[in-house]
Image (cartoon, coloured by chain):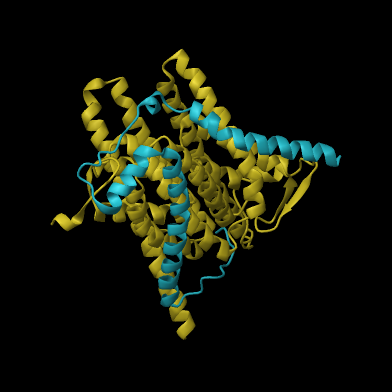
Amino acid sequence: MDWLYVLMPISGVTIFWPGLVILGLGVGIIGGFFGMGGAWMVTPGLNILGFPMAFAIGTDVAHMAGKSLISTLRHGKFGNVDYKLGFIMLVGTVVGFEIGAQMIMWFERLGKVDLYVRWLYIILLTLIAWMVFADVAKKRKKERELKAAGKELDGLTTGIEWHKTLHKIKIPPMIHFKEAQIYCTAWLPIFVSFLTGWLAGILGIGGGLIRMPALIYFVGCPTHVAVGTDLFEVMISGLYGAGTYTYKGRTELVAALIMLVGAAMGAQVGTVATKYIKGYGIRIAFGLAVVGCGISVVMKLLPRYVPATKTVMDVSATVLILGLVAALSLYILFKMIQGAKQELAAKNR
Amino acid sequence: MQNVWKQVIGLLGLLILLIPEMALAAGEKADLIVIVADTRKLTGWEAWWANLYNESHAYFTLLTVISIPVVGLILGIVADFIMKRIGIDLSSRELAEH
């Protein structure tokens, strides 16, 4: 069975390549569906396959750039990418990210930075999960009220509508974002992207997990456009990250390319699935993914207070993350197949 | 007003050029460790690739950054072709939140 293993020329380790393809497929589906890079899922997966930690992050970032490119192209054809918004947000993201990264360097000198970062991460994930589920509950309440009054809910109605208040800010230049169907001051997406970039820089993550809900709740993008535009951002930041990590000698291109084979198909499946799932379906599934991510971070934090639980918690966190990847990607795949079948049946009628 | 915009764009351009340097400065302490690929057991393209890594991280980075989007694009087109064979409409969707 030697043919199932491939030698990585840089790190010198031998890796089970079908594992890389499956991992790429899973995160490709989830990434294309939610509009995020998914580093928090890939890194433990690569580690389990036998990758040294030094190469796991760089390899993940490199494959993320290619995967997001595939998803962005497909989302673009669906009209889910607002390129103007994406380019404007890129400025805020890059500047915010670098300030966040520099701040972490400064905090490191004060010590205990890792602990504070993890707590900040947990608080942030809790807030995002609360925001998503509060939004869902509010929208359902509106639905019930309208039903009682004998009316039907408009297709674009949302629960939380903070963006409507933010759109009242009229500081020039005012910009119309065609795909996102919003008209607001250019400073709103710049400020939101700066804030999300800054948080991503501090937390040492790609930022898709924060940027996607920020695009929905603060900028006012419809869910599908938030997913597509966020993927465009992930693509650019992924390429930039691939460059810096590779320059530091931390990327195994062979592994990234093998992962891309699975991710190419996965990204298509995840993106096409958004065609069959309404915005709120995506928001609920995203909320569940955030809860899973939050629990895994708590599991990694717990051994600091109860050292005896380290082994159990490490294994449990990895099992949880990989279980979540498997469950979410199977759900999305199922929904995509179901939707495609219905569309084909309607076509043949 | 045009001059102000020129200056702002110029400064943004400078910032983008300087950012990789800042990002490297913000790297972890482990980045100071130099990893060398063991080329003794490698032959053919693997040996070439590992040697390139050992000799110049700059060329290695350049090739990686070019390869990823190119391969991504090719694989994307192949995956696109396969998806189109299913027969579903891949160019439009109905916008709806619920």
* Residue at 63%, 54% in the rendered image: A83
Estimate the x, y position of residue A119 in percent, counting from the top left: 43, 26
Instruction: Classify the position of the N terminus of chain A by image quarter.
Output: bottom left
**Front-lying residue, A127 or B28:** B28
* Residue at 46%, 33% in the rendered image: A204
Estimate the x, y position of residue B86 in percent, counting from the top left: 41, 76
Residue B31 in view here: yes
* Colour seen for chain A: yellow
The quadrant where residue A247 appears: top left
Residue A212's place in the image compared with A270, above or below, is: above
* Colour seen for chain B: cyan
Residue A159's place in the image compared with A147, above or below, is: above
Residue A218's place in the image compared with A204, above or below, is: below
Residue A250 in view here: no
* Residue at 46%, 67% in the rendered image: B77
**Front-lying residue, A190 or A181:** A190
- Left or right of A272 in this view: A196: right
* Residue at 19%, 44% in the rendered image: B41
**Front-lying residue, B37 or A108:** B37
